[in-house]
Amino acid sequence: MPPRRRPASLRRWVDLWAQYQDFRRPNVSPSTYQRDYRKISDRLKALKAAAPHLGEAVEILNYLNSHYSAETTRRTMQQLNACGKWAATQGLVKSNPWEGLQTQIRRPPPGPDAWAAFTAPERDLIIAKFEADHPTLAPWVKFQFYTGARPEESAALTWADVAPDYSWVLFNKSRPGDTGIIQRTKSYRETKFPCNPRLTALLKSLSPSPKNRDNWVHLGPRGGNFDYKNFQERYWKPLVNHLVDSGQVACYLSQYHTRHTWITLALDHLPPQDVSYLARVSVDVIYRHYVGRNRKIVIPEF
C-alpha cells in the first residue's frame, strides 16, 4: 500500500502558523513567544524562500532534517503538529498532515553530566578563586551556590523581593538573558526562600544605602542588570577550566550546575519535599535526577 499523501503547501502553513502563533500568545510566556514561536515562523519563511517546490509534509521533514540539526527538526515538527491539531479543530484544514512526524526524529538522550554537581570542596574552591581574581563577581557566584536559583531567577531579583531583615528571598519571576523580559519562573512556581546566616550576611553585604526597592539585587560591573550569559563566557568558563587544568576541580560544568550542586547537597540535610519547594521543581524530578546521585552506597565485605 502506498504511503498516505500529506499535502502541505508552505504558503498555506506560513499563514496558518501566524494565526496559531497569535492564538497561543496569551497562553505562553513572553520569552517563549519571542524566542521559540518566532524561530518557527522565521524557519518556515526561510524554507518557503529556499524550497518553494516542496508540497508534502514528509518532503518538508526530510528537507529540514538535511539542513538542520535533528533536535531543531524535531522541535519544528512538534510545533507544526500542534499547529495542525489546532487548525483541524478550527475547521481550517481537513486533516493534520504533520501528525506523528516528530516521532521519526528521536530526542538524543541527555549526557551523563546533565545533572552533575560540584562537590562541596570544589564549590568552595570556585568561590575562593572568584574572591581572589574577580571579587566584584564573587557575590553572584556565592548566591548561585547558596540558593540553587536558576540564573534567570537571580537576575530578576529586586530588593522588593528580599525581606527587610534579610530573613527570606522571594523567587517568583525570571529574566531570560536573551529577551530581558520579566516573566514567571520556568516552572510557574514561587518560593519564599529562608535565609540561613551565610545567605543573610551575603545579602547585607550587597545591600546599598539608601536602598531602592525597585533596584536590582545583582548589578553588572558597570551597573544595570547582571548579564549572566556574558559572565558565563567571559569569567566562569575560563576560571573553572583553569581549576580543572590544575587538578583542583574534577571536570568543567557550566554555571547552571551551581543549581544542581545546591540541590544535590541539600538532599543530605533536607527531605526531598522541602528541596522540591525550595528549588521550584517537582518531587518527581528530584527523585528521578538527584536522589540517586547524592546517595552514598557503602558495600560491605561479603
Image: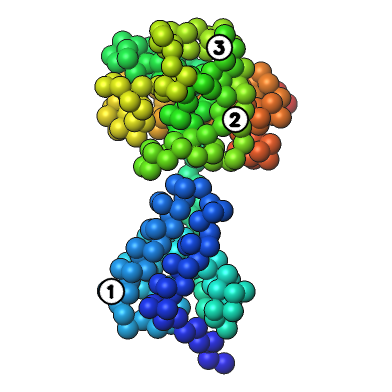
Q: Along the polypeptide, which appears first: circle 2 or circle 1?
A: 1
Instruction: Give, as a three-letter code, the residue at label 3.
Output: Pro
**Residue bearing mark 2:** 279
Q: Quadrant of the N terminus?
A: bottom right
Residue 253 showing in the rendered view: no
Q: Secondary structure at mark 2?
A: helix
Badge 1 crowding class, 10 Å Cα cut-off, few under 14, some 14 to 19, many 20 or more, is: few
Q: Quadrant of the C terminus?
A: top right
Residue 156 showing in the rendered view: yes
Asked whether 302 or 171 is in front, the reply is 171
Q: Which quarter of the figure has residue 61? A: bottom left
Q: Along the polypeptide, which appears first: circle 1 or circle 3?
A: 1
Residue at point 62% right, 36% down?
189
Q: Which quarter of the figure has residue 47? A: bottom left
Q: Secondary structure at mark 3?
A: loop
Residue at point 40% right, 7% down?
209
Badge 3 crowding class, 10 Å Cα cut-off, few under 14, some 14 to 19, many 20 or more, is: few
Instruction: Give, as a three-letter code, the residue at label 1.
Output: Ala
Q: Along the polypeptide, which appears first: circle 2 or circle 3?
A: 3
Badge 2 crowding class, 10 Å Cα cut-off, few under 14, some 14 to 19, many 20 or more, is: many
Asked whether 220 or 59 is in front, the reply is 220
Q: Position of residue 235 (x, y in %)?
A: 29, 25
**Residue bearing mark 1:** 49
Asked whether 122 or 227 is in front, the reply is 227
Q: Secondary structure at mark 1?
A: helix
**Residue bearing mark 3:** 164
Q: How many marks?
A: 3
Q: Is residue 144 left or right of residue 91?
A: left
Q: Is residue 223 left or right of residue 8?
A: left
